[in-house]
Amino acid sequence: MVQYTNPNLDASFAALADVTRRGVLEKLGQAEASITDLAEKFNMTLTGMKKHVGVLEQAGLVVTKKVGRVRTCQIGPHRLDEATAWLDKYRQLWAARFDELDRVIEDLKQREKFDGRKKSE
Amino acid sequence: MKNRTTVERKSERELVVTRTFDAPARIVFEAWTQPDLFKRWWGLKSMGMSLRSCEMDVRTGGGYRLVFSNGMEFFGRYIEVIPNSRLVWTNEEGGADGPVTTVTFEEKGGKTLLVMLELYPSKEALDAAGTGAADGMDEMFGQLDEFLAGDSGTAS
């Protein structure tokens, strides 16, 4: 069992692991929408859509507010944090790769030194 | 002491990664263009991932295809190759939303500053890559999570 270091990130990634929820985020990125709108758009029952929005809300990716009888959804405050978190992961991916690359380069430098010595002999 | 890797979202459509290497540009370039060398560092063995195969026809118009041990594939073609100085390639596994990657190797005092720029076709495409919606990224970052959680080697 893998322990995630950041529970918020874990919730965000779980929330994003579903194609409908990613679609909802994309939609809300363009404009806010009511749960009814979203349910129609994604061809889903109101209850089904409420569940998806709930998961997104839990992860802080979406916030909802009730005006009269309509619940409106919009992109939540975690959006920026997520972008930063992603960039950081991306950086770590490349840092890990480049540390390996350092080793390869070290070998190449050694080889060149060795070849150079052989040539001058 | 390891050199620092920096990442910056330079614009709505661009990501930039920089890193200095303690070697002349021709050596760094060689490690990016020789399949047997490339395989040794691109695969992230420490994260339990390795490249199962690596085909690279490094010349303008030439293609490449990388296959990871878990079956993930990355492919595209080189659109510019200037020895020891510049590489530009497409990333076509994600369809039309894939970025164009430009890597420049700039030598100064025996060291090389490497700048890798990924230019996405749209802000939306870069955002999608960021949310993990892009092909392959979910899995890639999943493995990275495991690695960062300190389970490298034993996690699967």
Image (cartoon, grey):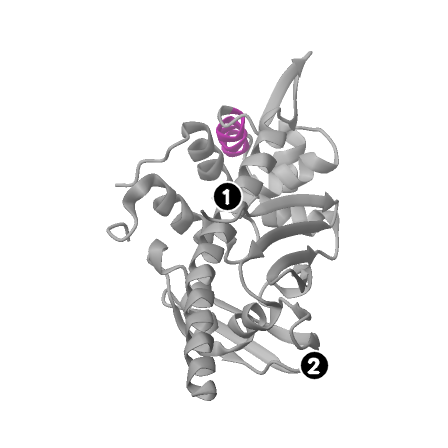
Outermost residue to the top: A68
**Left or right of A75, for residue A58:** left
Q: Which residue is mark 1?
A: A89
Along the viewing direction, whichever of B4 and B94 lies nearer the viewer:
B4
Helix, strand or loop at label 2? It is: loop
Q: Position of residue B18 (x, y in %)?
A: 62, 52
Q: Is residue A106 above or below residue B137?
A: below
Which chain does the numbered disc 2 sit on? B
In magenta, the rendered stretch is A47-57
Would you say residue A51 sits in the magenta stretch? yes
Q: Nearer the viewer, residue A43 or B67?
A: B67
**Chain letter belonging to callout 1:** A
Q: Where is residue B17? Give x, y as percent.
A: 62, 51
Residue B118, quarter of picture: bottom right
Residue positioned 70% across, 76% down in the render: B82
For the residue carrying disc 2, how many other residues have a C-alpha within 10 Å: few (<14), some (14-19), or many (20+)?
some
Marks 2 and 1 sit apart, C-alpha to C-alpha, by 31 Å
The quadrant of the picture occupied by the C terminus of chain A is bottom left
B13 horizontally vs A18: left or right: right
Task: Please name the residue shown 58% across and 53% down the image.
Answer: B19
Residue of label 2: B60
Mark 1 and mark 2 in contact (Cβ < 8 Å)? no
